[in-house]
Amino acid sequence: MSDQNSTELSSQSAGKSRLRQAIDKITALITLSHTTNVFTVKWCMIRTRIHELLSGLTAIEKRGPGGEHMLLSGEVIQAIIRTVSESDQLGKRCMESTYNGRLFMQSDLSKLVFGLCIFIEKPGVLACKDDKIVYVKDLLSRLKIGDAYMKREALIDFNKVVQEDEEFVDICVETNGVVSVLVSFLDSEVIDIQEESAKAVFEISRYDDYRRVLASTGMIPLLISILEFGSRVGKEFAARCLMNVSEKSSFAWSILANDGLTVLLEICKNIDVCGSELVVLACEVLKNLSWDREINEFMVEQGALKVFIALAKSKDEIVLLSSIDCLQIMVSTDDANRDLIIKEGGTLVLVDVLNSESFVSWKVWQTASEAIMTLCLESTSTLNIILGYGFMDHLLDLIEHKVFHVQDLALKATIWLCEMSEVAKEAMGERGFMSEIVKFLDAESNEVRKLAAKALFTMISAPKNRKAFLQNQEHG
């Protein structure tokens, strides 16, 4: 036998072997299709096409060597095998999801044949719970077996319904597999999927009863990873979710154990890069963590006080409020932090906030003045420090200029300062506080009039001030 004839027979044998392999795979796929509990027009059409392919290939095989099967090249047969193998895998993945008579087929398998998928429509406002359950299971199926685009669209649909209807949140948590799938997507390399899943777990985390369910799926380390490496949108939703689950110090130690404190502080240090909104969210999480005394001490060791003091210099009102709140809580949790804040220049920063020339808003002024009062609580030395930084001058300036919404705050601060120190009280009398306070006795606001009367009464309780006040009245 010539070498040429041997080569031809070998080629025929290989071609026949590949053809038999394709037929076997198609036969197995047809068997699978009959055991899959999915009954839709699409699925029946897919099954019919597979039967037709099997019939055609079987007919070619029966013609034998030299027959028409030689018209099919090895590449064509290999392409058939690859397609059938892919269909086989998709079919098995479909079987992993539970379908019932009310569900439509909406997998990659339908997409393989028609290039589109059939989904269950979102139930209306008045839909019963059973219909909502069916819809949630449909979403779960798409999340499990869909491609990246289908997963993203399913997540978008999920986020829409849980925002519109609280009952959907209950159903999603109660439906086995939904929460674990959503959390698993936090680790996705597809940015859109990661962002939408972060939004989804945030929506669920708004409900206190379900936070433990989320945490039990390993969500916290994945959220911290997003905070460190994710997109801006992903980071913001991750921070919001951590803010929820850390409320009342819940899961605070889990955040700490996964290096969350370091990541959060790093965000606060880089406000120019991270942006105000993300920094504020990070501050809110840190505020929740700081209520635990042991974590509070660790935060101080990691430089949290310095970070908050630096943020208190910001011109952004929301950042200012968040950072000052954090400082107050740090002191409230551990009194030892008061001296550290003073040492790091925190009091000077807070007093500067009260400067009318750099005035931000009455809310910031109120928060800063309350923080100063907290720092000076039962501490004469701290009071002397803030007076040395010009606290009294800023206070008088605000009273003189009658800054809108700050009149009552300034009067309250005046009363507080009089009650804190006799020396300060006499000094205020000398600075002209009394003549300015008198002007508020006929203010339109009843609250302001009462505060002015109390401030004046407190101030003239000092003999020196009373004498000066009477003399001014006589000459007035």
Image (spheres, rainbow, N blue to C red):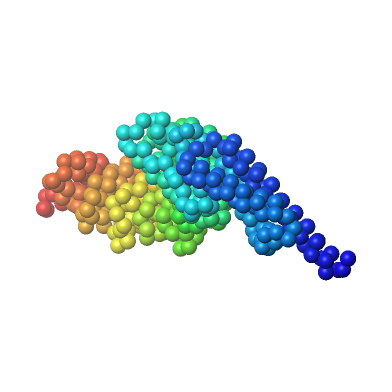
User: Residue 271 vs residue 27: left or right?
Assistant: left
Q: Is residue 341 visible?
A: no
Q: Nearer the viewer, residue 30 or 67?
A: 67
Q: Is residue 371 visible?
A: yes
Residue 116, x across and y down, in percent: 46, 52
Label tally = 0
Residue 99, x across and y down, in percent: 51, 35
Residue 237, x across and y down, in percent: 46, 49
Residue in the image at 37% along x and 53% along y: 318
In which quadrant of the rendered image does the N terminus lie? bottom right
Compared to residue 381, the image places residue 292 above or below, namely above
Residue 388, x across and y down, in percent: 39, 56
User: Residue 396 vs residue 212: left or right?
Assistant: left
In the displayed orientation, state which residue is furthest to the right: 1
User: Residue 223 vs residue 28: left or right?
Assistant: left
Q: Nearer the viewer, residue 377 or 108?
A: 108
Residue in the image at 61% along x and 42% along y: 30
Residue in the image at 61% along x and 40% along y: 32
